[in-house]
Amino acid sequence: MTGASAVSAIGANSAQANPGGKTPPNEYVPIAEKGAPSGVATLDLEAKIPPALIPDLSAAYAPVLADGKGLVRKGDLVFNVMDYGAAGNGLADDTAACQTAINALPEHATLIFPGRHYIPGNLSLNKKHITLAGPGTLLDGKVVIGTTGTREDQFWNVTGLTFERSTRGAASYGIELLKTRRGTIQNNVFLNMDKAIYVHPLPTAAAHDTAQVKIVKNEFADVNYAFYVDRADVANWMHTSDCKFLANTVNVAYITHVYAKSIDGLVCSDNVFFFPSYNTSDGAAKAAKKHNIYIGQSDWLVIKGNNCFESGEEAILLDMAKHFSISDNLIAWPGQKAPYDAVKFTGSNSPNGMITDNVISRFSGNAIGVHTSGNGTIVVKNNLCEYDAATGTYYGTPALNTFTHHGVYQPAASTDTLIESGNETTGGIYNVRKDSMFSAVRLNQDVAVAGSKSAVTVTAANTPIFSMQSTRGGTALFSGMLLIEVKNTESESGNLSSYLFHVTRHPLGASLTKVSEHGLLTGGSANHPSFTFTVDGTGKLFVSPVGATSGKFYFYATYQGNLRLMKP
């Protein structure tokens, strides 16, 4: 018997031999076995093992020595690159020694890098169940993970390492991912490089070749990109899928924090993203910075709980996204280089998604811009949009007070349905501008209220301003209430008149019944918004000036019921 079982047996035998008594030293224990690493130890009079008899295993399991050796022994499941010839001094080329150590690893092994390892030749990992661990640093090289052949679920882990480059040149990476699935990159530091974590799809890449990679709690400093997903020209756009970028801090990135040309599934959550500040003296850095998050053709995106600071262009730009959820992000000082929407959607992929409960502060263009086309639906709800023309962080042109800003904006060319409700703006700007016929504000499931705008120069009678349609599209039968506010300027101090109508298109034609009107109605001056309204049989709405009224006017329509307006 050895170890705890032997000690337990001695205690039991002693109690049986001397009930209520003390066990004499040395009884039942051969002298030759006392204190031996695989032998037994004598219990003292207090039923404890005397310290002098505890085996000394310090030689077998020694702590790290001054030269970095001794933490683990060759042949254990925990390996040390120092035992394979690595110098670890940051000067000698450790590439071959480190690669030899990786090649020697069995499954479920951990390889320790304890020093500063100069690896200009790069390292390759294409095994299952391997952990590469710090606390050391890998200098001027990268770790390439995965295969160019048949993809595998590899379950690797990279943790506790520092990746550092002496220059931030093109194609300087920390980790490069080929065909590989189910890996974790956590608690590492990436310093001074182009793309810290780079997904490199091959020209023959198939769907989901690089998948289920988790990037968690890493620190990135002075990188152009923290996470970059490339796309080969002929590759399947879904080659990278179901990745997570969680709880990382990027301080700073010089171009874009998270950049994916295409991806099929991404959770980007609880990260903190910094750019060089607007007041830096580095003009090149101010000109280079773009997005906190850019995603190209994609599906199944979750962007949640991130702090996105000081983007040069859009903070979040989704181009050709299919399904997405963007929520609970704090976005501050975006669009510093020129007027950009803080959050923008583009492309013709018929997107379906939600943007909810975000705080968007000090933007230069619009807070949220929907520029998509297709037949999708985007819900924009409960966002706080804080505008400040005197923000001080904007260094672009033109000046912010020379054009109009909105909390939510959808141009006429956008053909996706925009459902907007509960958003708030501050700073004296318009809450919502929706020039598209596909805009709607959904208050609940039974009532739809929507808004449109038309800027028209009116100098003669029967000038068209809107076309009315059913909410189901086309010129089908429709009915609803229509409130039109008319101003001679987009500013809050312009002249104003308002007109309320009940409108309908029935089998015999269309009708327009005035309920009430208020404001400057008599046309006493050219800039007075004084008009009469008529409708033709197709639902087109016309205005005629009253008195001296003449010039350019802005017609803001709010409508309720089975009714939708678009430009004529």
Image (cartoon, grey):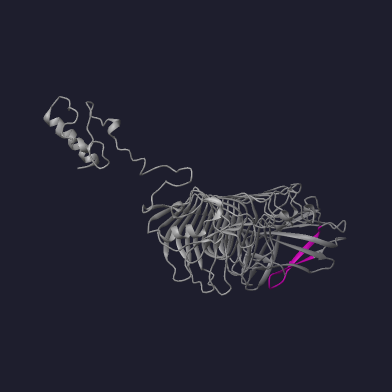
Residue at position x 24%, y 41% in the image: 3
Find the magenta span and give its range.
Answer: 529-543
Residue at position x 42%, y 66% in the image: 152
* Residue 479: image location, x then y, percent: 62, 65
Q: Quadrant of the N terminus?
A: top left
* Residue 451: image location, x then y, percent: 67, 59
Along the horizontal axis of the image, is 510 left or right of 303? right
* Residue 409: image location, x then y, percent: 68, 59
Outermost residue toward the front? 32
Residue at position x 47%, y 46% in the image: 68
Q: Quadrant of the C terminus?
A: bottom right
Main structural element of the magenta stretch: helix, strand or loop? strand
Q: Does residue 320 lie above or below 136 as drawn?
A: below
Along the horizontal axis of the image, is 263 left or right of 480? left
Q: Depth check: give the residue in front, 129 or 336.
A: 129
In the figure, residue 434 lies in which quadrant? bottom right
How many numbered discs?
A: 0
Q: Does residue 477 lie above or below 308 as drawn?
A: below
* Residue 161: image location, x then y, percent: 51, 51
